[in-house]
Image: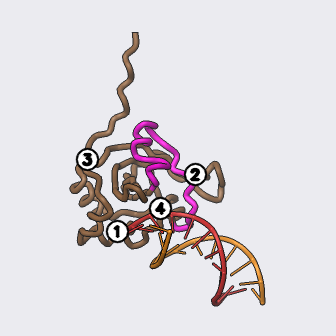
Chain colours: A brown, B red, C orange
Amino acid sequence: MKYWMVKSEPETYSFSDLVRDGKTRWDLVRNPTARIHLRNFEKGDHVFIYHSMSDKAIVGICECIATAYPDPADDKWVAVDLAPVAALQNPVTLAAVKAHPVLQKMELVRQSRLSVCPVTDAEWAIVVALGGVKETKPAPPKSRR
DNA sequence: GCCAACGTTGGC
DNA sequence: GCCAACGTTGGC
């Protein structure tokens, strides 16, 4: 199993939107390097969600539930499907990442414009330890009678 | 195939 | 709002 990070502006699509939706198509990625990474997603890989711009923090974890397929909007590009796994209790901010001797070497810092990038096992463990993990369950079905 | 001009992303 | 970094476009 591999680890990844995808970025999104929370005003456009946030981790809480993903929790609400239960799963989502991660599409509209229009960068050649990001596409290479997306194509390497395997089912079961875990993925950090990073909120860019207004938040600038790693906020949650999701899982790849469908590997790359053509982006319905433009089949030159690809999409994957993601489902939420857990929120970070304390989002790990970009400032914290830059302040950490190991995390400051993350692709997130090295190439800030890349919207899909790999995360090493070591980086993953540190972020999870710093952030703490809170189970994110789909809303329980409403009892009806 | 090179490179200047322009566009986009995202941090500050 | 500015700018750095990177990508894309198009003239030559």
- Spatial CA distance of label 4 from label 2 is 18 Å
- Spatial CA distance of label 3 from label 1 is 21 Å
Pinpoint the chain carrying mark 4: A
**Residue A145 percent across, percent down from the top left:** 40, 9
Pinpoint the chain carrying mark 2: A
Q: Secondary structure at mark 3?
A: strand
Discs 3, 1 touching: Cβ within 8 Å: no
Q: List the residue tagged with mark 4.
A: A115
Which badge, 2 or 1, comes first in the chain's sequence? 2
Please rate how many residues cluster around mark 3, counting C-alpha atoms within 10 Å: few if below 14, some from 14 to 19, many from 20: some
Of the 4 image quadrants, the one containing the N terminus of chain A is bottom left
- Image depth: mark 3 or mark 2 in front: 3
Pinpoint the chain carrying mark 3: A
Q: Which residues are magenta?
A: A8-33
Q: List the residue tagged with mark 1.
A: A106
Which badge, 3 or 4, comes first in the chain's sequence? 3
- Spatial CA distance of label 3 from label 2 is 32 Å
Tell me, yes or no, whether the highlighted magenta stretch contains residue A81: no
Which badge, 4 or 2, comes first in the chain's sequence? 2
Please rate how many residues cluster around mark 4, counting C-alpha atoms within 10 Å: few if below 14, some from 14 to 19, many from 20: many
As shown in the figure, which amino acid type bears the numbered disc 4? Ser
Q: List the residue tagged with mark 2.
A: A69
**Residue B3 percent across, percent down from the top left:** 63, 89
- Image depth: mark 4 or mark 2 in front: 4
Nearer to the camera, A101 or A47:
A101
Q: Secondary structure at mark 2?
A: strand
**Residue A9 percent across, percent down from the top left:** 46, 54
Pinpoint the chain carrying mark 1: A
